Amino acid sequence: MLLAPDSSLLLPGERGFNFRTVRTDQRRGANNLPTEVPITFMGSDGQLASDGMGQIMVSLDSPFDKQANGKPLIDRLGTSNLAPLVVNGQINPALAASNIRVIKDTHGRTSQLSAEDFNALVMYLKSLSSQTVGTQTGTSGTGSSKSKGSGTSGSGKRLP
């Protein structure tokens, strides 16, 4: 399940991916949407081009500056002009100062979930992933993965 990058429900070492990063000072393309801002990942060792298990970093490259080939600097691969997405558990304020907007909940509304609701939803999703097609076993919550029925949370509590 995707959480926002500054969600209090994230456990230590977890990263939230329920967001998009866009420029607030430029739009482009036929649909005139805000310019997407690339992200990358630091390694667990704090280095780029490593294992990708570190913090999420956001490109600070400008869409107005051009490369030698005439293409916008923001479109190049391999920049080191980066800022962390999250600082001290909050969206990095330096991003807004650099005309970058972080849009949360772009892959489902998870920011409003309480810890109890989140845990119940996780248990429900886990119960669905353990189901096998074509079998029904009483009230344990297992059955056909194609059915729309309810399951149990493991504590006997019915889930929607």
Image: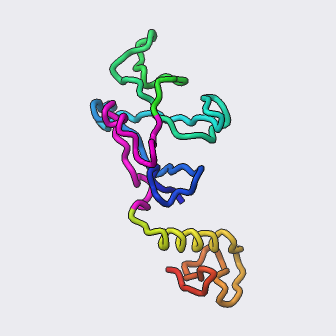
If the image is split into quadrants, where does the N terminus sit? bottom right
Residue placed furthest toward the top? 68
Frontmost residue, 121 versus 32: 121
* Residue 125 lies in quadrant: bottom right
The residue lying at 45 percent from left, 32 percent from top is 83
Residue 39's x, y, as percent? 49, 35
| Viewer can see residue 89 | yes
The residue lying at 41 percent from left, 60 percent from top is 111
Residue placed furthest toward the bottom? 138
Residue 66's x, y, as percent? 39, 15
In the image, residue 102 above or below residue 140 = above
Residue 104's x, y, as percent? 39, 51
Q: In this rendering, would 105 be left or right of 52?
A: left
Frontmost residue, 146 versus 130: 130
Asked if residue 23 is among those painted magenta in the image, a careful observer would answer: no
Residue 47's x, y, as percent? 62, 29
Magenta stretch, residue numbers: 84-111
Frontmost residue, 60 versus 105: 60
In the image, residue 158 above or below residue 76 = below
Asked if residue 98 is among those painted magenta in the image, a careful observer would answer: yes
In the image, residue 13 above or below residue 40 = below
| Viewer can see residue 30 | no
Frontmost residue, 27 versus 55: 55
Q: In this rendering, would 42 be left or right of 4?
A: right
